[in-house]
Amino acid sequence: MLNKEFLQAHMDISPEVKEALEKNQAVVALESTIISHGMPYPQNLETAKRCEEIVRENGAVPATTAIINGRIKVGLTEEELEFMATDKTIIKCSTRDYPMMVAKGLNGATTVATSILTAKLAGIKLLVTGGIGGVHRGAQETFDISRDLQELATTDIVVVCAGCKSILDIGLTLEYLETFGVPVLGYQTKDMPAFFTERSGFQVDYAMENPQEVASLVHAKWNLGLDGGVLLTNPIPAEDAMDEKVINKAIEEALVEAKEKGIHGKEATPFLLSKVVEVTEGNSLKANIALVENNAKIGAQVACQMAKLNK
């Protein structure tokens, strides 16, 4: 059971975010693992700042989440963003790690799972990320399934992403979400995007043509008492997408090396992404930046429409 007094004593909501929440204005949560573990410096810091700018340009208030010295942060200062982008001791924090970060006063970068958790604690209903975690290849034997999916399934939140990274088993990920009743939407597409590429070969449940349609579906879902999240997949812009053969070859090479080195669990994705950047000579990093900025734009627009309906 949530202890509100304990939460208030351990959470810092920035004045900008606090004011927006009090006025029922559009707020967009942003994760910080992409800053600390997803990109090299200085691109990580530049991208974090640019995403916040894009959210503001599209009418919403950005709320980057993190845990710093055990304090749950909702909305970071420039100094805190710089810290998250440069400090090498920051822990990739999933749900199981969350209480340890707070209890021990540690520094944690929030994954999609813990960004959803933090957004819930703060009262934010939309999160923007790059790609959502999912069912890993070979999960039939390893049971390696990202906690992102459970937090999404059990929390009233919209997660905007560029689909699943193709290092995952996308088909099984969609089956998992269907089992838990999570609507998977495509922004102006019926094709499930695959992070670096526009298509994965799988279909989403529904194509949404504009932010208003997304907001209307979410409004209907929650007002019918149908608890749980909604996944909005937004394809990488065509001009920034990578060649499917090139990216799949890079991923296969990275997967082989990860298996040889025994890398798995929450360490797998940062390793695989760094190897893909290496194999593609940096082109995958450019694509990663483009897709997360595009998600920030669409996410802010959807958040604004959700705020209108709530009023």
Image: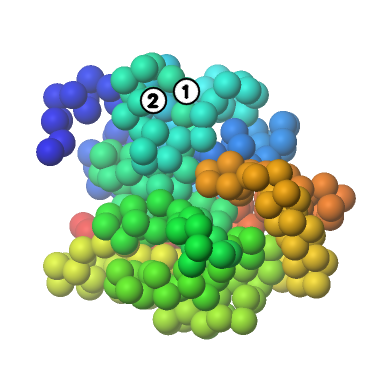
Compared to residue 274, the image places residue 8 above or below, namely: above
Going from N to C along the chain, the mark reached first, 2 or 1, is 2
Label 1: how many Cα within 10 Å (few below 14, some 14–19, many 20+):
many
| Quadrant including the C terminus | bottom left
For residue 211, which quarter of the picture? bottom left
Compared to residue 77, the image places residue 203 above or below, namely: below
Which residue carries the number 1 mark?
107
Residue 5: % across, % down: 14, 24
Residue type at numbered disc 1: Asn
For residue 149, which quarter of the picture? bottom left
Label 2: how many Cα within 10 Å (few below 14, some 14–19, many 20+):
many
Q: Nearer the viewer, residue 257 or 232?
A: 257
What separation in Å lies between label 2 and label 1 (alpha carbons)?
6 Å
Task: Say which element carries label 1.
Answer: loop
Which residue carries the number 2 mark?
101
Left or right relative to 259: residue 111: left
For image coordinates 22% across by 28% down, the residue present is: 7
